[in-house]
Image (tube, rainbow, N blue to C red):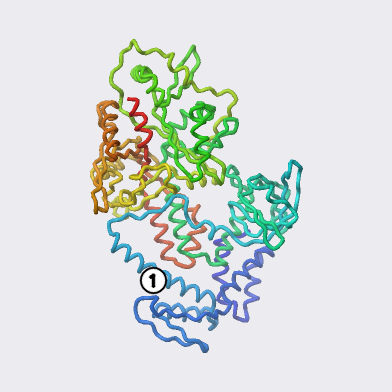
Amino acid sequence: MVNGLSMQKLVNELKGNVHSSRFEQLFSEKTERLSGPQKLQLKLRLNELTKPATETIDLRRKVPGPVEVYPYHGRTHFLDNDARKLFTEGLRNNCGIYTVETYRRIMQYVREQQQKRINKQRADHDGSKLGSFVLGRYYRRSEERMNFVTDVVVKTTIDGKPAKFKAVTVDISLQGMQLKLPGTIPVQKLQQQRVSVYHTGLASEFVFNGTRAYEYQVLGTHKKDNHNYLRLRRRALAGADALDKLLSGLLNGYKYRYKVNVDHVIHSVRSKGHEMQWLQAQQGIPLVFNGMPEKAAYAIKTQSNQDLLEQICRQQPLLFNGLINERWIRLKLAKLRGQSEQTRLQIPFYFVQLPVKGVLRQFAIPGSAMRQQPAIKNILAGLSRAGYPVLSLVLSVTYSHIDKFFVGLLSELELPAWKTVKSAELKLAPLRNYQIFTQGVKATKVVSEHQRLIQLYTQCGLCNALFVHQDQHLQRDIGLAALMPFKHGLPSWFQNPELWLSKSHKILGGEKFEQELLQRLNDLKPSDSAKTKTLLLRLSQSDGDEEPTVNGRWLSDFVSFNEASLYMQKLYQQKKLLAVNVELYRCSRPAIKVLRDDLNYVQSYLPHRAKTLERQIKSIDAVIGVQDVTAPLLRLAMSA
């Protein structure tokens, strides 16, 4: 099977000859090594591009500059100079015929002119604003779903009995598909059920194994014209496989044939290119789990989280599922699962490992325990002074109702030490109630390249980011922000766009802190990250002011956590507090090959935009991760 780039090369070589007498001979010569389905796909694409167009083009009031009459075969077009050049070039390349491709190129030119005008208006109005995009939110459906009819066989259970029936696809994508079935099948009983699908139709048309079952979940059903329809989604845990490979090639060819909006593809490529670096900057542990300790949890390895990953997941693979099996965490996760809107929950706790009678034991102590038993604070402080690592951790978690999984980020909080404690109070008995037990739980699996898990984590993005670009003169500048895809469970200050998109970088505490962070990049090599630091922001906003005033202070600058706690509680009472974890990561060279098919698609229509887009992605020098930790810090502060 030829890839998208090879197929596009053949299209470019042949499309100018479709209306010539030599076409069939040239087609045979150029496609002698292609299979029958590939030749058919190529001819369909050529016919689509080169068939005569019937649309009249009128650019009056749509483009800047003068527009003139351009008569052609009894129709009157109104074109400016650039559109006229595209029109005559199309005639020259297609034996004097005005084709669909020529019409599409001119319409794309018009969209570009309109977008330039809009961008200029926005730039004039928002000259001090950063660009931004929302994590995991690009035009996936228009790009990656195609109308494709092929046979499948579905196996499942209905009312506890095995059921098997034939169906045909209506549309299909990498993430799922829609099926059409006979109206006699009670599909309503399959809602949210898992089914096994055999792609027998693909096996008859391509080199593909039709006897292998692929698992899907039923998202919805409906009835129309005496037929039933199923909406199916592939399971998030499914890794990349032969079906993905086949569909990727088909979808890429479909995109060329039906001319997906180029602006959508550009938006998608820009987002994906930055998201790849955003993921590698995560110093916390991205997690995907279903909340049942007897099922495996998944941790995603990044360039920046090796130390925490080693301690929490590799040395003690049963630890995380043991942690979420604790009753005080189970209750919180159950409440989160019951939320109708996607919401973020944060669970702060202290984590320590101690040898007890020669066996290493793990303890997770919530902040509420320290309020109920103040002696625990003295115990942990004493253990820290004695050389035992006491980690302050926060599990930020949300629930995906579509995929039926929890998505989390386990991060470390940077806390100053407590005031000196009396050694007489260092008795370990109060910690016994907070020991983590791992009997009967499944291990956590560490993955680094799992397309669906990474996609699910990105769509539930639990950490914002600012991207540092470096130009050809080695000058660095923060040029783009990535924002979380939901708002429930976040403090209002963190959602404030004026705080995030201000070029004075108020989310970083102002220009002084921004310059400090950029300066620290000089000490980092590619793929290196600096230790997470927690920044306290004192915020206020006067009536009529668009942007808030901000004063920043590193949490580590306080003499003790006791002192920091008093400061935080005072600001919280005044509704002026925001606390963020700031992570700094120096990027390695991006994996452009992952984006190559989409870049080639943009290249075929807008070569200059493709080059600019690739340069922008390659210019990402660093990522500044910014995670809200206001609520968990306050909970710990209340017990300090």
Establish if 202 lies above or below 301: below
Q: Where in the figure is residue 445, as x and y percent of width and height?
A: 55, 34
Q: Tag 1's secondary structure? A: helix
Q: Quadrant of residue 489?
A: top left
Establish if 81 lies above or below 349: below
Q: Where in the figure is residue 597, as x and y percent of width and height?
A: 52, 58
Residue 49 shows in the view = yes
428 or 556, which is in the foreground?
Answer: 428
Residue found at the far bottom of this picture = 74
Residue found at x 24% / y 41% = 551
Question: Dot 1, how many residues are within 10 Å of its Cα: few (below 14), some (14-19), or many (20+)?
Answer: some
Amino acid type at circle 1 is Gln
Quadrant location of the C terminus in the rendered image: top left
Q: Where in the figure is residue 92, as x and y percent of width and height?
A: 50, 81
Drawn side of residue 30 relative to residue 463, left or right: right
Q: Where in the figure is residue 605, as x and y percent of width and height?
A: 47, 68
Residue 585 shows in the view = no
Establish if 575 lies above or below 206: above
52 or 111, which is in the foreground?
Answer: 111
Residue found at x 52% / y 64% = 260
Judging by the rendered image, the residue that carries numbered circle 1 is: 113
3 or 52, which is in the foreground?
Answer: 52
Residue found at the far top of this picture = 424
Quadrant location of the N terminus in the rendered image: bottom right
Residue found at x 54% / y 82% = 97
Q: Quadrant of residue 610?
A: bottom left
